[in-house]
Amino acid sequence: MSDYDDYDEDELAPPAPDWQNRVYEVFNPDHTVGVACDRDGEVVGLHLTDDARENGDTWLAAEILRLARLAHTKSRVGLRSEMEYNGTRPYTIDSFDLPTESSYRAMEIAEFGTNS
């Protein structure tokens, strides 16, 4: 009998992210409207509260478009993360003009004025 444990690197490694099924969500600061995009940037979900519907069609349409643009950008940040995780070279990632996490955060702050 030994006093040590066999180290198995695979046993301790976290599971690989499920990139294919990942969804990127963005909500407005008061959480009345939300939009979700898949990894391809396609809208796959929409969240509306009764309060959001009471603000009128013009406001609601503008809010949905604003959040859809952010959710699409967030999915592109996810694509950058996926490429980095898979070992893609930085110059290749940069050639796709994919946003960074910090540039997405700056975009979100510019839209909402806060860290939401």
Image (spheres, rainbow, N blue to C red):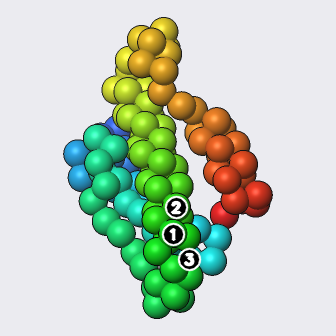
Q: Residue drawn at (36%, 69%), measured in percent from left and top?
A: 46
Residue 109 visible in this rendered orientation of the protein: yes
SS under mark 3: loop
Front one among 85 and 8: 85
Q: Is residue 35 left or right of residue 103?
A: left
Residue 23: image location, x then y, percent: 34, 56
Q: Check if mark 1's residue and mark 2's residue have beta carbons within 8 Å.
A: yes
Q: Residue drawn at (42%, 45%), measured in percent from left and top?
A: 72
Q: Residue drawn at (53%, 64%), measured in percent from left and top?
A: 63
Q: As shown in the figure, which amino acid type bears the numbered disc 2?
A: Ala
Residue 62: mark: 2
Q: As shown in the figure, which amino acid type bears the numbered disc 1?
A: Thr
Question: Which residue in the structure is indicated by mark 3?
Answer: 31
Mark 1 burial class by Cα count in 10 Å: few <14, some 14-19, many 20+: few
Q: Earlier in the sequence, mark 3 or mark 2?
A: 3
Q: As shown in the figure, which amino acid type bears the numbered disc 3?
A: His
Front one among 77 and 72: 72
Q: Earlier in the sequence, mark 3 or mark 1?
A: 3
| Label 1 – label 2 distance at C-alpha | 6 Å
Q: Is residue 109 left or right of residue 80?
A: right
Residue 58: mark: 1
| Label 3 – label 2 distance at C-alpha | 15 Å
